[in-house]
Image (cartoon, helix red, strand yellow):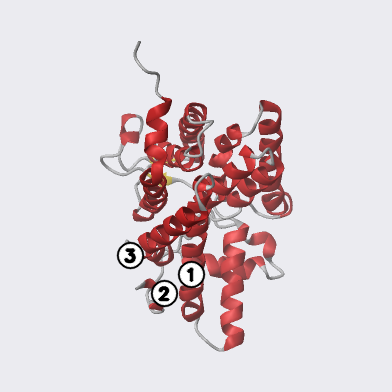
């Protein structure tokens, strides 16, 4: 369906690619002078690279971007789906990966990530799952780097920090968090130090019927300072999930899902693409639970005396 869609106006993607062109120009310092730009340098740079490749091949941007991104997103999700199943036979992992890949295609999850111009809605949770697998192995530097790189796609990638609590001990988790913060800082530092950085001056307009209406009136402004409150909620939800499921591989999808849901509780507006990571993680969770994890989790519950 989506892989052959080369004509749709794809949400913010064209805008991001244009900002990527600026990133690769002599005026790169002005890349984040527009407060509307809430994507990171890795995302806009990647999309601009696809645009340049399409130009070199003599085809339109979407002619190349659509099949390339659809395939990359589908393969990424399928790969991540196997990580919580690493304790299962290879045949089980393979079938689950195929099922999840078919699921994200048939439900339109990958297509909508492309159509709305926000592939980071898939790639960031994928990076969190991979980071969780690394953290469980004690490879917290790699895990932290993945989280920091996710912030280079969109800044909410930093919300993945609770996944580091799956590390063998607090010292390694702390080291991973330091790596994540340093990686993200390095990606944005040149624009903050040498450019005109306006990202944090953006204001969102609060919608009607949102949970955040308990604190802010509809059509009022939602500044970045409220993002800090939202961050605390998301980190708290993820940390709780990591604490409860620390010894289970189900934490690899449960912690990201808790973070995403925690984040959404205080969004000023629920844009359509915000459902993408929920659906994607839901498919991975279903694959894990359907192949035996549910029974394992039930067995962990204390039995009545």
- Earlier residue among tags 3 and 1: 1
Q: Is residue 66 above or below residue 133?
A: below
Residue at 48% in and 70% down: 71
Marks 2 and 1: in contact by CB < 8 Å? yes
Residue tagged 1:
71
Q: Which mark is residue 3?
A: 2
- Helix, strand or loop under label 3: helix
Depth check: 226 or 115 in front? 115
Residue tagged 3:
106
Quarter of the image with the N terminus in it? bottom left
| Horizontal side, residue 189 vs residue 288: left or right | right
Q: Quadrant of residue 296?
A: top left
Quarter of the image with the C terminus in it? top left
Q: Is residue 289 above or below residue 240?
A: below
Residue at 49% in and 29% down: 236
- The location of residue 81, given as percent across then percent down, is 48, 52
Residue at 59% in and 49% down: 151
| Horizontal side, residue 147 vs residue 186: left or right | left
- Earlier residue among tags 2 and 3: 2
């Amino acid at each position: 369906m989506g892989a052959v869609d080369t004509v749709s106006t794809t949400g913010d993607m064209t805008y991001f690619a244009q900002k990527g062109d600026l990133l690769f120009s002599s005026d790169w310092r002005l890349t984040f002078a527009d407060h509307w730009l809430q994507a990171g340098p890795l995302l806009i740079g990647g999309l601009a690279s696809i645009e340049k490749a399409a130009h070199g091949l003599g085809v339109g941007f979407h002619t190349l971007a659509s099949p390339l991104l659809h395939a990359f997103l589908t393969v990424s999700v399928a790969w991540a789906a196997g990580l919580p199943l690493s304790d299962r036979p290879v045949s089980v992992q393979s079938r689950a990966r195929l099922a999840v890949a078919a699921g994200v295609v048939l439900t339109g999850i990958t297509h909508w990530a492309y159509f709305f111009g926000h592939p980071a809605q898939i790639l960031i949770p994928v990076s969190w799952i991979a980071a969780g697998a690394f953290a469980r192995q004690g490879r917290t530097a790699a895990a932290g780097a993945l989280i920091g790189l996710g912030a280079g796609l969109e800044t909410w990638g930093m919300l993945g920090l609770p996944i580091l609590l799956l590390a063998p001990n607090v010292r390694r988790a702390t080291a991973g968090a330091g790596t994540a913060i340093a990686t993200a800082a390095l990606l944005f530092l040149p624009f903050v130090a040498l450019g005109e950085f306006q990202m944090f001056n953006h204001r969102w307009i609060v919608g009607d019927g949102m949970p955040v209406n308990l604190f802010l009136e509809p059509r009022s402004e939602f500044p970045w300072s409220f993002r800090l409150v939202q961050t605390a909620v998301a980190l708290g939800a993820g940390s709780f999930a990591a604490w409860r499921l620390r010894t289970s591989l189900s934490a690899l999808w449960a912690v990201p899902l808790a973070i995403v849901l925690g984040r959404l509780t205080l969004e000023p507006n629920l844009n359509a693409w915000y459902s993408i990571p929920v659906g994607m993680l839901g498919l991975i969770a279903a694959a894990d639970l359907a192949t035996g994890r549910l029974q394992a989790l039930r067995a962990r519950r204390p039995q009545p005396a």
